[in-house]
Image: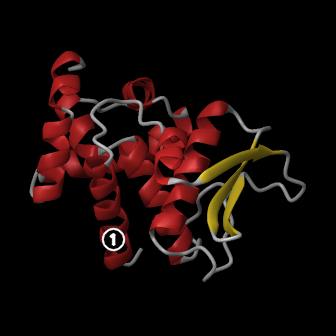
């Protein structure tokens, strides 16, 4: 993935967490959408996709499959919120399904946004969460999503580069009470 897409998605997550004063896990993308004036609707899609986002009379709207497990619905809402906040809606053909390395950069950026929103690295680091099971438990995400996140966290733990960005440091401070009571 192009580093600029990654960086934009990551930084957008940090700004969102800061702006909405989020300080505990699990992060609630549905509540965030309501705060931002984004409508979230549940439906049974006929095309097999888990969700989509679009403008409906100028109002950002997210459709989420009601047939998906709750943890998948949360990831889908976060993914689609990423499309909206990253400016993808109305500009690209978007699909939400299982991530693939062959996904276009826009889908990859929305997946980065969703995973960083639901499982912020600095918070996982502060809690010393390393295994998929620990991450899934703290973040209320599927074990599959937690496995992806644990793989990335292993790289970050190896590098030891946490709290480098002023935005990340601010997110960490916002979660400090949560981190203090959820150390593993």
As rendered, which of 79 and 130 lies closer to the eye? 79
Q: Residue furthest right?
A: 46
Q: Residues within 10 Å of mark 1 (few under 14, many from 20)?
A: some
- Name the residue furthest top: 181
Kindly indicate the quadrant of the structure image that contains residue 3.
bottom left
Asked if residue 102 lies left or right of residue 115, the reply is right
Looking at the image, residue 30 sits to the left or right of residue 27; the answer is right
Among all residues in the image, which is located at the extreme bottom? 91
Q: Position of residue 175 (x, y in %)?
A: 21, 33
Residue at point 20% right, 26% down? 179
Total count of labels = 1
Q: Is residue 163 above or below residue 124?
A: below
Camera-nearest residue between 111 and 73: 73
Q: Residue shown at 45%/47% (left/top)?
A: 148
The structure residue drawn at horizontal position 21% and vertical position 29%, both measured from the top left corner, is 128
Q: Is residue 102 above or below residue 181?
A: below
Across and down, in percent, residue 75 comes to 56, 45
The answer to whether 140 is drawn above or below residue 9 in the figure is above
* Secondary-structure class at tag 1: helix
Image coloring type? secondary structure
**Viewed as shown, does residue 97 lie left or right of 148?**
right
Rendered-image quadrant of the C terminus: top left
In which quarter of the view is residue 6 placed? bottom left
Q: Which residue is disc 1 drawn over?
A: 8
Image position, residue 158 (x, y; %): 17, 49
Quarter holding the N terminus?
bottom left
In this rendering, position of residue 128 left or right of residue 137: left
Q: Please state the horizontal and vertical placement of residue 89, each as a whole percent of the image.
A: 60, 73
Based on the displayed image, in which of its 4 quarters is residue 172 positioned? top left
């Amino acid at each position: 993935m192009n580093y600029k897409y990654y960086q934009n998605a990551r930084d957008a997550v940090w700004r969102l967490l800061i702006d909405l004063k989020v300080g505990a896990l699990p992060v609630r993308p549905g509540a965030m959408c309501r705060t931002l004036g984004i409508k979230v609707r549940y439906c049974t899609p006929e095309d097999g996709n888990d969700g989509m986002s679009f403008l409906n009379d100028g109002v950002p709207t997210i459709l989420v499959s009601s047939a998906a497990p709750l943890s998948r619905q949360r990831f889908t809402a976060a993914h689609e919120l990423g499309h909206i906040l990253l400016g993808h809606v109305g500009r690209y053909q978007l699909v939400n399904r299982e991530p693939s390395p062959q996904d276009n950069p826009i889908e990859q950026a929305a997946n980065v946004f969703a995973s960083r929103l639901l499982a912020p690295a600095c918070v996982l680091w502060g809690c010393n969460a390393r295994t998929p099971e620990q991450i899934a438990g703290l973040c209320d995400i599927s074990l599959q999503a937690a496995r992806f996140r644990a793989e990335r966290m292993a790289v970050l733990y190896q590098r030891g580069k946490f709290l480098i960005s002023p935005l990340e440091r601010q997110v960490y401070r916002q979660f400090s009470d949560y981190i203090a009571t959820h150390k593993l």
